[in-house]
Amino acid sequence: MSKVYIALQDNEESRYIVEAIEEDNPDATVIYQPAMIRVENENYLAIKRETVEEKMGRDWEVQALHVNLITLGGNVDEDDDQLSLSWNE
Amino acid sequence: MTIEIKTATLEPVRNTFEHIKRRFGDKPASRYQEASYDLAPEQNFHYRPLWAPDKLLYDKSRTAVVMEDWYVHKDPRQYYYGTYVQARARLQEVTESNYAFFEKRGLANGISEPGREKIIRCLLPLRHAELGANMNNMFACAYGTATVVTQGFLFNGMDRLGIAQYLSRIGLLLDGNSGESLTAAKEYWMNDPAWQGIRRYIENVLCLEDWFEVFIAQDVVLDTLVYDLIYNQFDQVMTAAGDGDLAMLIEFMQEWHKDNSRWVDAVLKTTVAESDHNRELIGKWAAEWREKAATDLAPLAEIAVGEEAAGAALEVLANRLAKAGL
């Protein structure tokens, strides 16, 4: 089992994204580093548009994630509604 | 010599204000939370208002609706002053470019004579109705409880003035800035039998003293009906008649209504879900005002759209109330 991870810049917008990730992936570990928030999880992590929109209170496109994205690890599966990271066993 | 770059992590001394911490826990709070929750004073008032000696400032008894805690509400759009202004500025930018395009291409000349008559009779008088809506929302803002609720009323009230101004500009575009269409529209508002029902309805709401009933009568019942009737059905009729250019000028109202409805639905749903007392009370208000609005709106609906229009608008309202749990 290896971990997938995503790191975002620590700012007003990312906070809502991280909140959404925490809600959708209860097992994920959130690590606050200087100016960066890193989220890790065993094997799988999903960022869902609907949850982020609810947290932000406005429309949000999954692609807008890249504005605050620093790095990520895992195989990416992205469509209009979500972005998920996973490792093939 | 080697240089080692080190990072030092500075922990903030505190995450947020004490009152936000008490409500949401000790973690970084959003600007919306900090600008909305537990702001209005609730205790230690020294004097009662001379004009209402039985009430305190921000008295919760100004409405018959009872909430254990009014701050359970949340604006799904998370508007506080900053986000609200940004959102409206964006919307207005689009609208301004629409109006500029309409003017540059002289699209007003392309609107047929009956179409122009219809706009002056069925759309322009709404600017007076919007002023009424402004006053009603300002009333609810002034006497309502909890910043998180009242700021929504204030934003709504200001938007209404903006909409009234856009309606006036539509009139000026149609009459070449002479203002004749606005005078005619005022005449319709004051004397045309088709408008007297709505005028009476709004004037009756102006006299209400319970601010939540004002919210139900104005923002829930009347707005749902009028906005569906005029900005949806009337728009379709105009487009079908070949005067679809009007759509460019009323897009602001359509987008605004969509945006505003999210807030109205959230306030309604949270309040209704609080207790059976609230559900019954609000259900009673909604039914009463719905009945009045149905009669008052019918003549205009028939002239603007057709016979089935009022029924279709009532259907939209019924769906909306059902979604809120009424």
Image: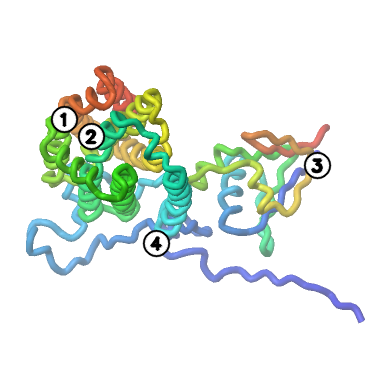
Q: What is the CA distance from the residue labelled 4 to the residue labelled 2? A: 52 Å
Residue B70 x/y as whole percent: 30, 49
**For numbered disc 4, what is the local secondary structure?**
helix
| Residue name at image x 24 percent, y 35 percent | B222
Task: Name the mark nearer the viewer: 1 or 2.
Answer: 2
Q: Furthest-top residue in view?
A: B308
Q: What is the CA distance from the residue labelled 3 to the residue labelled 4? A: 41 Å
Residue B285 x/y as whole percent: 18, 33
Q: Amino acid at mark 1?
A: Ala
Task: Have a look at marks 3 and 4 and say if they share a chain.
Answer: no
- Do labels 3 and 2 touch, CB within 8 Å? no
Read off the residue under disc 1: B194
| Residue name at image x 52 percent, y 58 percent | B27
Q: Taking B232 as reference, is B293 left or right?
A: left
- Do labels 1 and 2 touch, CB within 8 Å? yes
Which chain contains the residue that carries disc 1?
Answer: B
Q: What is the CA distance from the residue labelled 1 to the residue labelled 4? A: 52 Å
How many residues crowd mark 1 within 10 Å: few (<14), some (14–19), many (20+)? many
**For numbered disc 1, what is the local secondary structure?**
helix
Q: Amino acid at mark 4?
A: His
Q: Amino acid at mark 3?
A: Ser
Read off the residue under disc 4: B19
Task: Name the mark nearer the viewer: 1 or 4.
Answer: 1
**For numbered disc 3, what is the local secondary structure?**
loop
- Do labels 3 and 1 touch, CB within 8 Å? no
**Circle count:** 4
Residue B86 x/y as whole percent: 46, 55
Quarter in which the N terminus of chain B is drawn: bottom right
Q: Amino acid at mark 2?
A: Arg
Task: Have a look at marks 3 and 2 and say if they share a chain.
Answer: no
Residue B149 x/y as whole percent: 31, 50
Read off the residue under disc 3: A2
